[in-house]
Image (tube, rainbow, N blue to C red):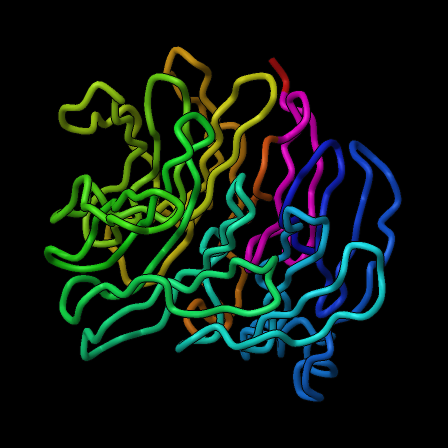
C-alpha cells in the first residue's frame, strides 16, 4: 500500500490499481474504486515481484479542488467525480511511464500541474502539463527548451507565497529550482548548475525552503535555503540520495534517503531523518535494502504522502526495503 495525500485527517492511498481512503490515525481502509488499467497492469500488478520489475501500480492520487479524484497508473491519468462513480481515463502523462511522486501538483486555485519525467538521453524539450477544468483535460502549459534540463523531478506550491516551484535534474548544469506563478506566465531559474540544487521534493517554512540533495555522485545532505536569499546552507549530511520528504503538524520536517546502486557515497540502509524548527536533525529509523536486484526490482525507496501529517504521526511506505517492503507504516514519533 502506498500513501499519497493527507487532507483534514483523511489519507488517500493505493494498493495496486485500487484507490483507498482511511481516516487517521487508525481507521479502516475503504475502497474508492479501481482504475480501468490494461490487463497486464490489472493482473501482474497483484504479484509484488512482477509489479516491481515492470513498474506497475498507482504512482499518484490527489483530490482536486472540486473533490474529484485524480490518479496516475499504466502511463495514464484517471479521474473520478467527487460524488462517486467509476474512474475514467482522461489522458496520457507525456513521455515516460509516470510523473514522480511529487510531480503532480494541485494549486490552491484549483489548477493541476503535471511534470514530465522520462529518460531523455537526447536532452530534448521537457513539458509541464496543466488542467484548468478540474482534471478533465490537459495540455502543454510550459516547455523547457532542448538542452536546459533532463526531466522534471517535482512540481510543488509554496503554501506561504503561492509560488510554484519546479525541481529539475540531473547532470552538469541541468539541476535547478525554478519558480513561477500558477499561470506559468514567467518561469525563472532561482538557482542551479550544481548538485547542491538537485532535489526531488521540497519542504517549506515561513523562513526557509529545505530539501535533501539527490546526488549519487557526491555525498548527499539536507539543505536549508533562507527566504532572505544567499547560498543554500548544508545542515545535515545523510547516507544517500534524498527523494521524498514530509512535514507534521507538530513542526517536524522529515526526509528519507534512498538506497541506490553504483554510488560510492550511498549507504545500504535507507534512513529517515526528522528535524525541528531550530534546524537540528536526528536519524529516527533505518531500513536495509532487500535481496532483490536494485536496478531490475527498484531501488530502496521511502514514500511519504503529500500534505501535513497529523500531530507527530509518521506515515510512509517502503519499496525494496526490509522489513516493510510493499507495506504502509503509521507510527508516532516520540519526542
Instruction: Please say if 33 is above or below 211.
Output: below
Q: Percent from the top left, x then y, of residue 278?
A: 39, 11
Q: Percent from the top left, x then y, of residue 218?
A: 19, 47
Q: Residue at x 34, y 42 (%)?
A: 181
Q: Is residue 324 left or right of residue 122?
A: right
Q: Is residue 147 left or right of residue 38?
A: left
Residue toward you, 16 or 161: 161
Is residue 314 found inside the magenta-colored segment of the image? yes
Instruction: Please say if 93 is above or below 235.
Output: below
Residue toward you, 102 or 334: 102
Residue toward you, 228 or 328: 228
The span shown in magenta is 309-333
Q: Residue at x 58, y 37 (%)?
A: 307
Q: Quadrant of the N terminus?
A: bottom right
Q: Percent from the top left, x then y, of residue 309?
A: 63, 31
Q: Quadrant of the C terminus?
A: top right
Instruction: Please say if 230 is above or below 191.
Output: above
Amino acid at each position: 500500500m502506498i500513501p499519497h495525500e493527507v487532507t483534514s485527517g483523511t489519507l488517500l492511498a493505493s494498493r495496486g490499481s485500487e484507490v483507498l481512503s482511511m481516516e487517521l490515525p487508525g481507521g479502516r481502509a475503504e475502497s474508492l474504486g479501481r482504475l480501468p488499467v490494461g490487463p497486464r497492469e490489472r493482473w501482474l500488478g497483484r504479484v509484488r515481484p512482477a509489479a516491481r520489475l515492470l513498474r506497475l501500480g498507482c504512482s499518484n492520487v490527489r483530490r482536486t479542488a472540486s473533490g474529484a479524484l485524480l490518479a496516475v497508473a499504466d502511463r495514464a491519468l484517471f479521474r473520478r467525480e467527487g460524488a462517486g462513480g467509476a474512474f475514467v481515463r482522461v489522458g496520457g502523462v507525456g513521455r515516460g511511464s509516470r510523473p514522480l511522486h511529487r510531480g503532480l501538483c494541485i494549486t490552491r486555485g484549483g489548477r493541476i500541474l503535471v511534470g514530465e519525467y522520462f529518460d531523455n538521453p537526447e536532452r530534448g524539450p521537457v513539458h509541464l502539463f496543466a488542467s484548468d477544468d478540474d482534471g478533465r483535460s490537459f495540455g502543454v502549459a510550459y516547455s523547457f527548451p532542448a538542452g536546459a534540463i533532463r526531466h522534471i523531478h517535482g512540481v510543488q506550491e509554496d503554501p506561504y507565497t503561492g509560488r510554484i516551484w519546479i525541481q529539475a535534474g540531473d547532470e552538469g548544469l541541468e539541476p535547478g529550482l525554478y519558480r513561477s506563478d500558477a499561470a506559468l506566465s514567467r518561469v525563472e531559474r532561482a538557482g542551479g548548475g550544481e548538485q547542491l540544487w538537485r532535489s526531488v521534493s521540497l519542504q517549506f517554512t515561513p523562513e526557509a525552503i529545505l530539501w535533501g540533495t539527490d546526488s549519487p555522485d557526491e555525498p548527499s545532505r539536507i539543505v536549508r535555503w533562507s527566504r532572505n536569499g544567499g547560498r543554500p546552507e548544508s545542515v545535515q549530511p545523510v547516507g544517500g540520495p534524498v527523494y521524498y520528504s514530509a512535514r507534521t503538524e507538530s513542526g517536524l520536517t522529515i526526509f528519507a534517503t534512498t538506497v541506490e546502486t553504483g554510488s560510492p557515497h550511498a549507504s545500504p540502509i535507507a534512513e529517515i531523518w526528522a528535524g525541528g524548527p531550530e534546524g537540528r536533525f536526528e536519524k529516527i529509523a533505518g531500513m536495509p535494502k532487500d535481496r532483490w536486484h536494485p536496478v531490475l526490482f527498484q531501488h530502496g525507496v521511502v514514500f511519504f504522502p503529500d500534505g501535513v501529517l497529523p500531530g507527530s504521526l509518521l506515515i510512509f511506505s517502503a519499496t525494496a526495503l526490509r522489513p516493510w517492503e510493499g507495506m504502509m507504516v503509521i507510527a508516532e514519533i516520540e519526542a
